[in-house]
Image: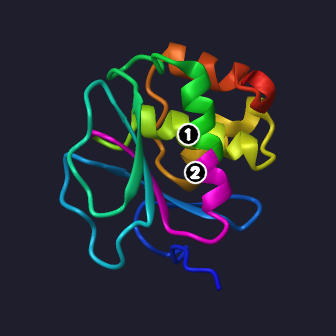
Amino acid sequence: MKDTWEASQAGVLVLPSGRCIRGRGLHYPLPPGPLPEFGVYLLGKPPPAASWEFRWVRWPDLRLPADQADALDALSEAWRRAESERVEVACMRGIGRTGTALACIAILDGVPPEQAVTYVRRNYRRRTVETPGQRRYVARFRPQEA
């Protein structure tokens, strides 16, 4: 049985496949409602403890992942698990790194790389994917990189 996010919940990005992934900022209080079952946290230092399973991707603010193969693996795991679990992706404010990661997950879901930033800006947050480097990272992101 699927136990995923409701599409109407705050911060939830609905992918073309119907998978739902929540983006959020760890700087803000945990949203009301069910807890995640898996998280991918994009931070320059280890994330705070959580009562659910998560992966930390070392990703300094306004930059790119320190280990791109690890980032691809974590985002691929998030995409796979989102089919039947509540998955969230988060950085401190839920904008730049989170939006970049969500755009890459959208590519994993079949969105063409040249459309992924627009897709996430339209369906998650208008100002997401903040830097030119993040936009280039999305444009060059390919699932077969690992």
Give the magenta-colored segment's residue range.
77-92
The residue shown at (61%, 48%) is 77
Spot occupied by residue 86 in the image (x, y as percentages of width and height): 50, 68
Judging from the image, what secondary structure is the residue with disc 2 in? helix
Residues packed near mark 2 inside 10 Å, few (<14), some (14 to 19) or many (20 plus):
many
- Say if the magenta span includes residue 114: no
Asked whether 52 or 99 is in front, the reply is 52
Few, some or many residues within 10 Å of mark 1 (<14, 14–19, 20+): many
Q: Residue at x 44, y 40 (%)?
A: 98
**Residue found at x 75% / y 59%:** 16
Q: Mark 1 = which residue?
A: 74
Residue 15 position within the rendered picture, expressed as x and y whole percent measured from the top left: 68, 58
Q: Is residue 14 above or below residue 73?
A: below
Rendering coords of residue 45 (x, y %) = 25, 27
Q: CA distance from mark 1 to mark 2?
A: 6 Å
Q: Which residue is mark 2?
A: 78
Q: Is residue 85 magenta?
A: yes
The quadrant of the image that shows the N terminus is: bottom right
> In the shown orientation, is residue 15 left or right of residue 92?
right
Task: Tell me: residue 110, above or below residue 37.
Answer: above
Image-based side of 89 in relation to 81, left or right: left
The answer to which quarter of the image holds residue 56 is top left
User: What x and y, as percent, mark residue 111?
Assistant: 78, 44
Name the amino acid type tagged 2.
Ala
In the displayed structure, would residue 78 be above or below residue 63?
Answer: below
Q: How is the image coloured?
A: rainbow
Q: Are marks 1 and 2 in contact (CB under 8 Å)?
A: yes
